[in-house]
Image: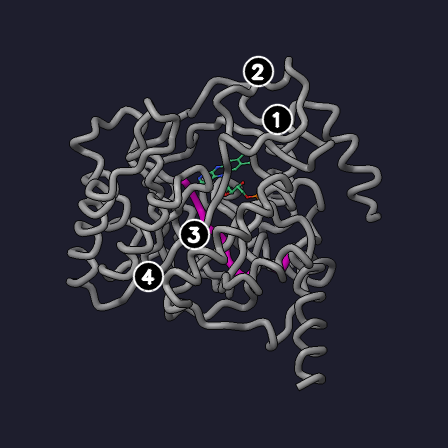
Amino acid sequence: MSFYTKITRPLLFLFSLERVHNVALWLLGVVGRGPFGQWVLKKLFAWRSPQLEREVFGVKFPNPVGVAAGLDTNAKLYRQWGALGYGFVEIGTLTPRPQTGAPKPRMFAIPRDRGIVERMEYPNCGLEKAIKHLRRRAYGQKVVVGANIAPGSVTSPDKFTADYLRLFRNLYQYVEYFTVNVSALVSDAERYTNIDKKKVEEVLDALFDFRRGQNQYRPILLKVSPDWSLKQIDDMVDILIDTPLDGLVVAGGSTRLGGRMSERKLLRMSGGFMSGAPLLERTIELVDYVCRKMEHRYPVIGVGGVMTAEDVQRLLDAGASLVQCYSAVVYEGPGFAGRVCRKLSANASAAEHKA
Ligand SMILES: Cc1cc2nc3c(=O)[nH]c(=O)nc-3n(C[C@H](O)[C@H](O)[C@H](O)COP(=O)(O)O)c2cc1C
């Protein structure tokens, strides 16, 4: 047990999770603002090894462990996450204009299950400010940055594609890959579960068209939900095979996979998405299913429920090329990526030794 899990975490959970979370992120921002702070973070937490480097969808990653969307929504901390030892950061979900998201409270810890329930509804600083933050990348950082994009909450459905395109076009020179968040294209009536293949294709076509005219190639991924039926997941795999889509992010928070919550808590959290340990088995099952379905020809980023190095290894073994985490950062503290990378290196050395 680390100092974080023994002392810091129980103290944090005494207060509103979102407030404490924001204070922790602010602190990380202050500590790692300059090169000296980043050097200290690196020395204290990161684990680097050439064994862990990999090229996925044409992008070089220092290691396969990344920060999931929602943790660095406004692109303010990617340098700090890189210093802590994460190989990549998915900023966003970003929308064209700033938005405040759902009323608070909207983020709850379920310590018994090592889970988090959220119904944030994508609060973010909007495109313009995010670009301002991304311009700081000029100072040089190895961490890969991807952008998770979605239409604004007040955008009418006939303008969704225009919103995606605006984000894609304007962020194109600042990030290495894109994740298209299609939750806006999901019908509310069916509680986030019914995804329309045609609508997804329409959005992607607009992005492919723009990309064709560019000198640099930016991979495009699509984040699928663990709540979709296999038929809907199959539809997304078909899109992956039939179009220039580059990969899938499988699979994120779930409205169905509950933890063991009291009825009162359940009521307060209704409509929320579960993240954390309760998701792991479903994520592994889906990553395995998707990878088999497309015969391991396209990359998958696995996300949902990883809390230990073993969990990360299981997702990689199931076929994921990269893995993202959110809840593990909250439950396991800032040294999570470093500890995972150290273990993955040891696993890789053991495998080499055996061969
Ligand atoms: C508070 C919170 C905010 C999130 N915000 C986003 C978001 O803006 N966009 C998105 O695609 N996923 C978002 N997610 C989902 C995460 O990216 C991730 O898919 C999910 O938490 C499962 O990973 P985990 O089990 O490692 O936490 C959010 C999750 C949490 C807990």
Q: Amino acid at mark 1?
A: Phe
**Residue in the foreground of this view, choosing between 325 and 347:** 347
Disc 2 secondary structure class: helix
Which numbered disc, 1 or 3, marks the residue that appears first in the sequence? 1
Q: Which residue carries the number 4 mark?
A: 246
Q: Which residue carries the number 2 mark?
A: 268
Asked if disc 1 is less than 8 Å from ligand 1, the answer is no
Q: CA distance from mark 1 to mark 3?
A: 24 Å
Which numbered disc, 3 or 2, marks the residue that appears first in the sequence? 3
Q: Nearer the viewer, mark 2 or mark 1?
A: 2
Residue under the point 57% across and 27% down? 107
Q: Which residue carries the number 1 mark?
A: 108
Q: Nearer the viewer, mark 1 or mark 3?
A: 3
Residue under the point 64% across and 35% down? 115
- For residue 30, what is the image quadrant? top right
Q: Amino acid at mark 2?
A: Arg
Disc 1 secondary structure class: strand
Residue under the point 71% across and 84% down? 353
Q: Are the two marked residues, 2 and 1, in contact with CB atoms closer than 8 angstroms?
A: yes
**Residue in the foreground of this view, choosing between 344 and 5:** 344
**Residue in the foreground of this view, choosing between 62 and 327:** 327
Which portion, as a residue range, is magenta?
84-93
Residue 249 is tagged as 3
Is residue 164 shown in magenta?
no
Indicate the position of residue 74 as horizontal and vertical percent values: 45, 41
